[in-house]
Amino acid sequence: MKLRKFYINTIGCQMNVYDSAQMASVLKQKNYQPCDSFLTADLIIVNTCAIREKAEQKVYSFLGRLTPLKKKNPGLKVVVAGCVAQQQGVRITERFPQVDLVLGTHMVHRLPEFLEAIEAAAQPLIETGMTKTIGEPASAIEKQASGHDVSAFVTIMRGCDNYCTYCVVPYVRGREISRRPESILGEIRALVAVGVREITLLGQNVNSYGVKEGMTSFPELLTMVNDIEGLERIRFVTSHPKDLSDDLVSAFGNLEKLCNHIHLPVQSGSDRILKKMNRRYTRSEYLEKIDKLRRVSPDIAITTDFIVGFPGETDADFLDTLTLMETVQYDTAFAFEYSDRHEAPASRFSDKISGPVKNERVQRLFALQKEITRKNRRLLEGKVFSALIEGESRNQLKKSGTSAAVQLAGRTSENRIVNFDFPCHWGIDFDLLKGQTVNVEIVDVLSNSLRGVLTRRQIEYLKSKGGHSHVA
Ligand code: SAH
Ligand code: SF4
Ligand code: F3S
């Protein structure tokens, strides 16, 4: 059978990254191989995101670019997967006749069978049915074949039952459902066996893992994952503040593999807006949880998401958001301008905020966070962190030619990137270093990264071991 080439364009959150890895994995087992450019592919998959209008527009502009390609190569197959596929269904093929398959968010594992079906079909296929069970993932198999990622995502649950009034996720990902712990643990063990050292557990609200099913709770699951030999680090996203339990807070003190970072999206600092958003916590309840976390782990890195310009947001509400940002002192923060999603109830709320006002507010929020980040990161200078080496730094990859040192990128437990030089004359194979944890002292603070140097002790240790080392 002819080997065919596929290209996946992934837009959106880690869930989509995970699903794209699943699709790549099943395709490789079916005589497809990945290629670097969609221009030379026989199969193009765009895995889409519907969270904001901009993300959705990105999908349509990409699909538009495929029209001439399909004319040139009628054998080319185009698949639209993910959240826009689920949301728009047949409207996609009506607007873009070049699309052969619309694959909903619950249908990812059935991709090969639908690909076979479109070979024979005269009409495009629309497969957006939703299921009540989660299929077994294929990513571990894929990693076994490739085996060069230090860090991997593992989905532990699907969907969301929270219905924040601005959000499309419950409509495009369906009801919340948790995977069985044995299945999750099996996947992580398989990943560790092929060299993965860090895993990020994924769910829209990991705090409610297992609750509906009456299974293991999320802190219990973390304890089980913590016991997996060979795994070094555990992360998770996302945590809904209303469900952040005391047990989970304690896990930051008890579980040595759990990283010293939490992403805790607040969305707004105003109680009035939080209520309209249906977030089901108040500003003071949120701040109380932040205090609890810092009591257990004083230097924990806390990051967040904000939405600015939610319908009805006044200057006073926005000021509450600014003061909350100042109070919490986030490590970093995302801020999004509110975007109407027609399924979500907020799209029908009155008092919409104009584009320029939203933009002005989001800029003010960015500016304040930039100041906070810069001020707090200065305090890291001279401190030593253990960094998991992910590979060459971005600067290094941009550089050409040879030099005396190669710049490597590691990630601290707090989820900060630290770049440091590694001299070439030590004769240590860089591939051996990937996935290792080393001690790095911070010497400089840049806008998006930290610069460090290996500690003297670490250098001696690495040299003595010829590169086979962990923290000295
Ligand atoms: N489950 C996660 C977030 C998923 S969406 C949680 O509960 O926090 C990621 C982020 O996108 C959200 O935190 C929110 O800040 C933003 N977002 C979601 N819907 C949006 C909308 N309609 N307009 C602007 N930003 C939105
Ligand atoms: Fe969306 Fe809210 Fe669910 Fe997060 S918790 S996915 S913001 S509905
Ligand atoms: Fe986007 Fe779907 Fe994720 S809407 S943010 S890709 S769950």
Image (tube, rainbow, N blue to C red):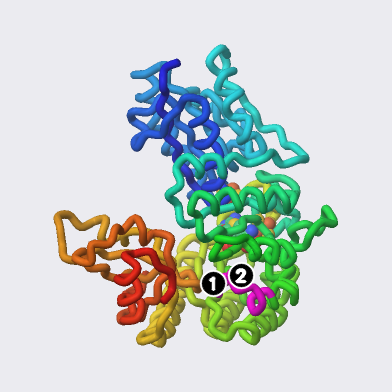
Tag 2 secondary structure? loop
Q: Measured from the top left, where is residue 107 in percent x and y?
A: 65, 34
Q: Are marks 2 and 1 in contact (CB under 8 Å)?
A: yes
Q: Which residue is mark 1?
A: 303
Which badge, 2 or 1, is on the more N-terminal residue?
2
Q: Residue furthest right?
A: 214
Please tell me the numbered disc located at residue 264: 2
Q: Residue at x 22, y 68 (%)?
A: 423
Q: Quadrant of the C terminus?
A: bottom left
Is residue 258 covered in magenta? yes
* Residue range (magenta): 251-261
* Residue 314 visible in rendering: yes
Label 2 lies in ligand 1 vicinity (Cβ under 8 Å): no
- Amino acid residing under circle 2: Leu
Q: Quadrant of the N terminus?
A: top left
Q: Residue at x 66, y 44 (%)?
A: 172
Tag 1 secondary structure? strand
Q: Residue at x 55, y 33 (%)?
A: 26
Is residue 461 covered in magenta? no
Nearest to the observer: residue 130 or residue 7: 7
Kindly indicate the quadrant of the structure image that contains residue 247: bottom right
Kindly indicate the quadrant of the structure image that contains residue 173: top right
Q: Is residue 347 left or right of residue 334?
A: right
